[in-house]
Amino acid sequence: MTFTEYPIVFWFCAVPAVLFIGLAKGGFGAGAVILATPLLTLAIPVTHAVGLLLPLLIMTDMIALMHYRRHFDSRSIKMLVPSACLGVTAGALFFGYFSGSMNALRFIIGVVSLSFVLFQVLRTLILGAMAKHRPTVLEGILMGATAGFTSTMAHAGGPPVLMYLLPQKLEKSVFVGSMAIFFASVNLAKLLPYHILGLLYVGDTKTILTLAPLTFMGVRLGVYLNKRFSDIWFNRIIYSVLFITGIQLILGQNLLGLIFNVMGIKP
């Protein structure tokens, strides 16, 4: 698809998706990143959506590292990143196997989306009753590999990393910095398998450059909001939208297209 071939509905999905990525990378609303892929798959094929988002994710990673590169937990990074690379490899093989079935990929992303919402609902109950815990090496390997796998499939590696980092009750800046370094490493590691799978399209360059300023705006806004406000209600809204989007992907119903038709807008 070239820049001019994208339907209107794509831009309605892409602009908030990229802003959500920036906000999350800036430390505000950690769950917002996972919404980006499901949003775009409402407008374009899954394989196209994940390939288009990867360069934008890397851009936001680099901007986020400028703010948080000195704040991270080195032990966690050493535990998570190597095993995540194994997960990326497994995810690429899995993605390649299902790449011929868009419905299967949409279903998988829908399941991942609903699983994330369920995790967010349960984590408060689980972590609220859990004392400060330093994860073991085995836990680090398992969570890192799982994060690498789900990140490759749908840019949705957040839940496993959160399960590893949150019990440690790290200082907020250290927590955000650890997330930034981990995902910067994982997203760079995904470039080669995405290229091999043919997910990176040269024709997307103009679209990526058009959306790129939103990554900078989103990160800067996320850093600002992270220092001044709680993200509780923002996250609740994100999880609600993600839940609805996940249901739509699983059922295969184009609810967004129906809304546009009712409004008299040609998707």
Image: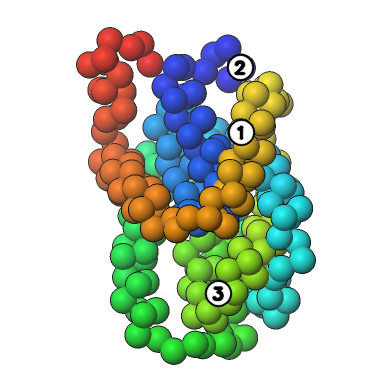
10 Å crowding of disc 1: few (<14), some (14-19), many (20+): many
The kind of secondary structure element at disc 3 is: helix
- Decide which of tag 2 and tag 3 comes sooner along the chain: 2
Task: Residue at the far left: name it.
Answer: 262
Q: CA distance from mark 1 to mark 2?
A: 17 Å
Q: Is residue 256 left or right of residue 159?
A: left
The quarter holding residue 232 reads bottom left
Estimate the x, y position of residue 231 in percent, counting from the top left: 44, 56
Q: Residue at x 30, y 48 (%)?
A: 240
- Residue under numbered circle 1: 214
Residue nearest the observer in this picture, 110 or 171:
171
Circle on res. 90: none
Marks 1/2 in contact by CB < 8 Å: the verdict is: no
Q: Is residue 255 above or below residue 172?
A: above
One can see residue 188 in this view: no
Real-space Cα separation, disc 3 to disc 1, in angstroms = 28 Å
Q: From the viewer's side, name the closer residue of 68 and 149.
A: 68
The reply to whether residue 21 is visible in this rendering is yes
Check disc 1 and report its element: helix, strand or loop: helix
Task: Please report the residue visible at 25 percent of the width from the left and 22 percent of the height from the top.
Answer: 258
Q: Amino acid at mark 2?
A: Phe
Q: Please name the residue shown 71% across and 68% down the image.
A: 71
Q: Earlier in the sequence, mark 1 or mark 2?
A: 2
- The residue positioned 38% from the left and 16% from the top of the image is 267
Discs 1/2, front: 1
Amino acid marked by disc 3: Leu
Query: Residue 224 at x, y = what percent?
Result: 59, 49
Residue identifier under label 3: 165
Looking at the rendered structure, the number of numbered marks drawn on it comes to 3
